[in-house]
Image (tube, rainbow, N blue to C red):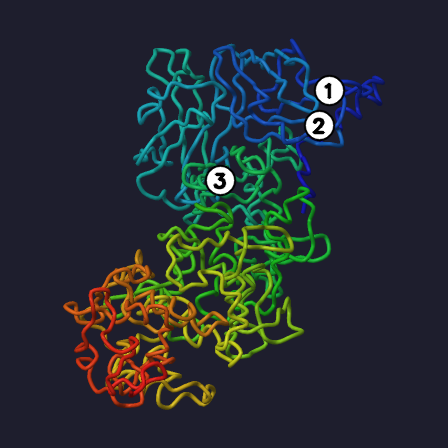
Amino acid sequence: MHNYIGLKSLRAFVLLNLTLIIVFGFSLAEPVLAAGNPVVTSTNPSDTQERVDVNLPIYITFDRDMDSSTMTSANLNVRDSQAQDVQARGIHYDSTSKTTVFIPLAPLKQDETYQLTVKTGVKDTNGLPLLQDYLVSFKTTLSSISPEPRVISTIPKASVSQIGTKRVISASFNHDMNPNTINNMTFTVVDQNKNPVTPKSITYDTLSRIAAFVPVSPLTTNTLYTVTLKGAPDGTGIKDSGGVNLVNYTWSFTTGNTDLNDPHGNYIVNTNTCATCHQTHDALNTSLLNKTTETALCFTCHDGSGSNYNINAGMVDTTNNQSFHPIMDTGNLATQQLLYCSDCHDPHGDKDAQGNYYNKLLKATDGTTTAYQGNEFCLICHGVNDRKFTPTYYGDTAGNHTNPLAAHYDTTKSALDSSTKITCSKCHTPHSGRYNQLTDQQEENLCLTCHTNPANSHSGTGNIQEQFFGSSTVTIVSKHDITSSDNGKVECSSCHGPHTVGAASLSEGKAYSDLSDPTNTKSVFTTVAGTLNATIGNMTDFCLKCHAGTPPSAIRTSDKVVPYSIQFPSFLFTTSTGWNKTVYLNSKHYLSGVSCNDCHIPHGSPYPSLMARGEDTVSTDGECLKCHGGTPPAAYATAKNVSTDFKSVSQHPTLTISSLHSDTETAADKMTKRHAECVDCHDPHSPARTVKTGKDLCYDCHSSSTYTGTIQNATTSKFSDPTVANLHLNSNHSGQACTACHTAVPHGTSHPGLLALTGEVNSTSQIQSFTVDGLGKLIGSANNWTKNSCTTSCHTVP
């Protein structure tokens, strides 16, 4: 593995410097003492140089160490005489030699003048820029018959045998060509019997200057084929963009027995295949490579023209792809230039103990450990050791992914197994991805790729997508909104770190949980101490990781990962404590052993507020009466039984959802329009027994403007006969506590109007039959109510 960039193409330049020093006593990069702003000390090619090789990179050497992040195509410009910019395959900076190398995407044109501009956007490591643009002009080599266009390379190579029958045939030119002159009359292929091969397509790529011939059907096995690129001087042949005729070019190759020729290892029995990658005398790179860069060599076939694996298309597609493995010299300068193809693939192949080549030529090493398959292959870079590719790369990729207990690493699961035994590839694409972190699905869609199948859920029975979104047979009323449609933000990975979670739930009390810590998803959330990255807590502690004063904020380092900042929806209908439930730790419920998951379902629910059960009714013990009903669960045997009270003659209509108490509330008015629910008076998450104290609690509903919470301000209300005076407003009653007349625990009683009496009153009509004077005062001695049907501490029998 190469540390950081490891510029192979600089080796030749360094050797050249050493040779010049030894033989002539000088170097292309004479050392200059750094002072003031940085300067360019030399370039190769140098200013006014002629006969520059069209295949070689361009080198720029500085007087000091430079900021590599400023070495971009915006700051380093190469332009031809027609003001056309040269596209870069890669731009590298080597701090050892203080040299930047600019590698063109395609060979330069012959007989052409170019200008290199090093702009003032280039800076040294202290942030000092060049004082002015640095300009260099040079001219490329002349063709043998100047200035004619020529073929400079072909695929397949001339005279090579064992070529695959599904081979695309192509040629690369030294000039920009006129694509209208490259057609089935000027680009022809015939077999050894002179039978023409019919093309499916003939194309010319202006950027790479490559013409490609795709046969309409596979070639015949073990057959000699001859390819001709016509350069007739009569004007009927191929021409360059300036109208100059191509020098006529012909070459031959022989097919083998297979669809696609595999040069990786086939050289053992057919040494001609070595020429696919190597040239003995005219190599353009180290290891006798016939391309200027290793990546360009791999793309000779892996651009879809000679292999089933088209790596080039994905690596340069910034329209559809957002993330890339940082492979060198792909031509996509949006990605970091860190890895060579050979850092992950052995181009000659490697065999296992049984003599079989490892799948996809995989091979990775950190200098000590070598891996050919399995997640161990990815962990060579994404494991415990920081490989120092860049100062931040280890943290940017979330550091160490090693986890022998992770459920997603288990190759025994059929949904995770693959030919390479790399389960990582089930979520991450190896070269480029449509979304961040090399994924082809976004956020919850990535998880639901597998977790719509019940067999892939923890229990083996649950369809996770159905739990969130419902189906034709399952209705979902509320959910943790992983789609963020309610302006909140929470994702599957906020609770289930994909590299962390195990195969047991928190409630099972197993050694490893399927929940990760939302404040750091690199740590598992488990009840068992001493396990990997363990935290101690129960389900309530887990929920309070988000339902606290400050929810987790997104962060990605080698030690801590919060994939998304948790945001709660803007509307609020979770009773008086809101989204912050930290007070629950002091509540009667919590102190009695009630955990969040006793009342709530984490993914989605057929009831509001993720409730596990529906509302209580006369015939059904729902969310509250499950414990506060006739026979509480054994774990909550001390829970107060209020079921009988609610079924009394006079009761708060909590179990009745009709008339004034119809269940008509919506998400927008959960706290302003609701029928008489338990949570109207009791906050299940708060230490307080009731939402408010005293008459303020009653006035929330029992006011002249029902549901507004304002205090009585009229002589009549909806809670007594509107044709007579309202006793609640009588001057001698209005200052009294509600419990002076009504039961202190107003669930239900045998007395009308929830009155707390000794039993004399048997109907509200007896109360409403009394008369009052014009001021609303009762008529009677000393304003005492002398009717013996209301004997209380206030009213006594004369």
Residue located at (69% from left, 38% from top) = 6
Left or right of 340 on screen, residue 481: left
| Residue type pointed to by label 1 | Pro
Question: Which residue is at the far left?
Answer: 723
Q: Compared to 550, does 632 lie above or below?
A: below
Can residue 348 be seen here? The reply is no
Answer with the quarter of the image where residue 306 lies.
top left
Q: Which residue is mark 1?
A: 38
Separation of disc 1 and disc 3 at Cα?
34 Å
Mark 2 and mark 1 lie on one chain; the one further toward the N terminus is 1
Of 106 and 479, nearer the camera is 479
Which circle marks residue 66 in the picture?
2
Asked whether disc 2 touches disc 1, contact meaning CB atoms under 8 Å apart, the reply is yes
| Residue type pointed to by label 2 | Met
| Residue type pointed to by label 3 | Met
Task: Bin the neighbour count of mark 2 within 10 Å (Cα to Cα): few under 14, some 14-19, many 20 and up.
Answer: many
Q: Compared to 404, does 428 lie above or below?
A: above
Give the label, 1 or 3, closer to the camera. 1
